[in-house]
């Protein structure tokens, strides 16, 4: 039964990390629906870290050519397009880095099956996605991500630490509202998350190595990792095509429905 729960949660993480419906929110809802409680907070944290690491790897596979081009450009040690892009990525990381340093304990306290909060944040995600419908009619051709855009998109990513606020949804929607080209904002959104998640993953692994879980079961971790990696590959590729076609309105409707259900269910519990 635990392996089945790990499989479902892994698929949820992989799909919702890239689809604009909030992976953190869906994982919290999934834990409630599946009654997932390993009985060890450290093991639960390790499981969450493993799922996030799996989706990072799937992103790196999908964008492997972009990442190699960036690395080649950086090692030329000149102010070229790749260096500028990397600088914009670093700028976008500042807001979420500040939140991580100053508000880590507060944010982690929100991840405790608070499904009413998740529902409210999903409604906000839905509003953001719905607004992109109007942004598409304002401009015929978008521009590349600028340095100012990177900071604003980074602020959107910082807000997305709240369970129920979609990271990909908020950053892509913000980029589109700023007039960024659809394909360029999709690429920037998925690449900008790599450094923060890799950094957080390494820190959590260090913490867990110093204080390992009392009850360590490898198989749920393996099952969850594989499920998240494979579903992440599919979702990342699918999401890129959806952004280009401007199909985010359907996810807005989905967020409105699931958010409303979560609020209703939470208030009756």
Image (cartoon, grey):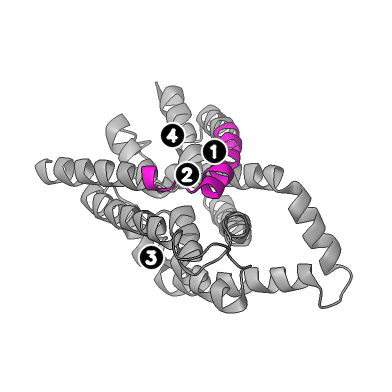
From the image, state whether disc 3 or disc 2 is nearer to you: 2
Magenta region: 229-250
- Asked if the magenta segment contains residue 237, the reply would be yes
Q: What secondary structure predominates along the stretch shown in magenta?
A: helix
- Asked if the magenta segment contains residue 218, the reply would be no
Label 4 packing within 10 angstroms: few (<14), some (14-19), many (20+): many
* Residue in the picture at 38% in, 65% down: 105
Reading the chain from its start, which is encountered first: label 1 or label 4? Answer: 4
Reading the chain from its start, which is encountered first: label 1 or label 2? Answer: 2
Q: Alpha carbon of mark 3 to alpha carbon of mark 2: how far? A: 27 Å
Q: Are marks 3 and 2 in contact (CB under 8 Å)?
A: no
Reading the chain from its start, which is encountered first: label 1 or label 3? Answer: 3
Q: Are marks 1 and 2 in contact (CB under 8 Å)?
A: yes
**Depth order, front residue of 76/54:** 76
From the image, state whether disc 3 or disc 4 is nearer to you: 4
Percent across and percent down for residue 132 are 41, 58
Quarter in which the N terminus is drawn: top left
Reading the chain from its start, which is encountered first: label 2 or label 4? Answer: 4
Residue 237 sits above or below residue 120 on the image: above
Q: Alpha carbon of mark 1 to alpha carbon of mark 3: how far? A: 30 Å
Label 2 packing within 10 angstroms: few (<14), some (14-19), many (20+): many
The residue identified by callout 4 is 9
The residue identified by callout 2 is 19
């Amino acid at each position: 039964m635990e392996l089945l729960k790990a499989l479902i949660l892994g698929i949820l993480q992989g799909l919702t990390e890239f689809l604009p419906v909030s992976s953190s929110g869906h994982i919290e809802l999934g834990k409630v629906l599946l009654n997932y409680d390993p009985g060890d907070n450290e093991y639960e944290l390790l499981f969450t870290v493993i799922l996030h690491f799996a989706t990072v790897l799937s992103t790196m596979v999908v964008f492997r050519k972009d990442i190699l081009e960036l690395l080649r450009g950086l090692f030329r040690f000149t102010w070229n397009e790749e260096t500028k892009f990397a600088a914009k990525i670093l700028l976008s990381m500042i807001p979420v880095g500040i939140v991580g340093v100053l508000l880590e304990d507060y944010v982690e306290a929100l991840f405790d099956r608070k499904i009413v909060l998740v529902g409210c944040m999903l409604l906000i995600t839905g509003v953001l996605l719905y607004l992109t419908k109007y942004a598409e009619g304002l401009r015929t051709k978008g521009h590349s991500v600028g340095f100012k855009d990177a900071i604003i998109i980074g602020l959107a990513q910082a807000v997305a630490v709240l369970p129920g606020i979609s990271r990909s949804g908020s950053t892509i929607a913000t980029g589109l509202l700023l007039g960024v080209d659809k394909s360029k904002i999709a690429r920037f959104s998925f690449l900008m998350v790599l450094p923060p998640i890799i950094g957080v993953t390494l820190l959590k692994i260090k913490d867990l190595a110093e204080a390992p879980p009392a009850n360590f079961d490898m198989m749920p971790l393996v099952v969850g990792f594989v499920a998240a990696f494979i579903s992440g590959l599919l979702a990342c590729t699918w999401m890129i095509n959806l952004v280009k076609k401007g199909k985010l309105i359907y996810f807005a409707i989905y967020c409105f429905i699931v958010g409303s259900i979560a609020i209703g269910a939470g208030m009756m519990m």
